Amino acid sequence: MCDPVTMAVASFGIQAVSTYSAYQSEKAQYQVEAQQADEQNRYYERNKREAIKSQIEQSAQTGNRLRQEDKGRAEESMQIDQQATADRATALITAGENGVSGLSVSGLISEFYAKQGTAKAQIAAEGKMARQQANVDLKGIEAQAEDRIRSVRKAAKPIKPSRLSAVLGIAGAGLGSYNGYKEAIKNNQGGR
């Protein structure tokens, strides 16, 4: 049988090396997980930037489209006003040249105003509907960007292995070996 000192030292050595190896393995695993988490978080940030950029571009396109449509409606409204003014002037001149006056001329002029008002009301209604649709489109673009951002998760940082636990494990191995040594000495003395 080996002497108690050799047994205690060997036991301590084996436990200390085992604890140190476990710590090194945990440390290597932590480094791999930390690198993976960093890569995932970079991907998350890149995805988020691209989603926001896309949202801005699509929103700008929607705004540009709406402004162009509004400009077209304003030009159409101006043409309606010009045409209605020209039609009323022509009617008044023609009526004056032909000696026509009274209620028939007033009725004709009122009809031109009514047509002008109806056409302009239609343009205004189209503008209102286009703005409402643009708002729906913008909300959809925003939701699409939010969904894209949420589709990628941020990674949690892994927990770094504690040196203290390795030191305590080695100290525990030392204490266990010391207790084993003491027990072996006690047994050797009692057995004689």
Image: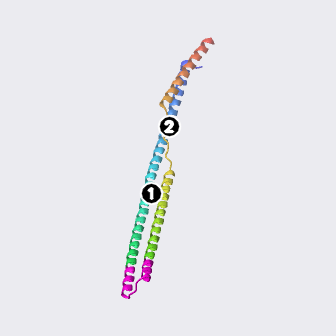
Query: Can you name the residue that lies furthest to the front here?
Result: 102
Q: Earlier in the sequence, mark 2 or mark 1?
A: 1
Dot 1 alpha-carbon crowd within 10 angstroms: few under 14, some 14 to 19, many 20 or more: many
Q: Is residue 171 visible?
A: yes
Q: Which residue is drawn at 59% across and 17% down?
A: 183
Nearer-the-camera pick, 46 or 115 = 115
Residue designated by label 1: 55
Dot 2 alpha-carbon crowd within 10 angstroms: few under 14, some 14 to 19, many 20 or more: few
Q: Residue at x 51, y 51 (%)?
A: 150
Nearer-the-camera pick, 19 or 35 = 35
Q: Which residue is drawn at 38% across and 87% down?
A: 99
- Which of the 4 image quarters holds residue 187? top right
- Amino acid found under the numbered disc labelled 1: Gln
Q: Which of marks 2 and 1 is in front?
A: 1
Q: How would you classify the magenta stretch by its main secondary structure? A: helix
Say which element carries label 2: loop
Q: Does the magenta stretch include residue 64?
A: no
Percent position of residue 112, x then y: 43, 78
Provide the residue span drawn in magenta: 86-112
Picture disc at residue 159? 2
Vertical relation: 187 (above or below) 30: above
Say which element carries label 1: helix
Mark 2 vs mark 1, CA separation in Å: 36 Å
- Amino acid found under the numbered disc labelled 2: Ile
Classify the position of the N terminus by image quarter.
Answer: top right
Q: Which residue is drawn at 39% across and 85% down?
A: 95
Query: Can you name the residue that lies furthest to the right here?
Result: 191
Q: Is residue 105 magenta?
A: yes
Percent position of residue 151, x then y: 51, 52
Nearer-the-camera pick, 158 or 127 = 127
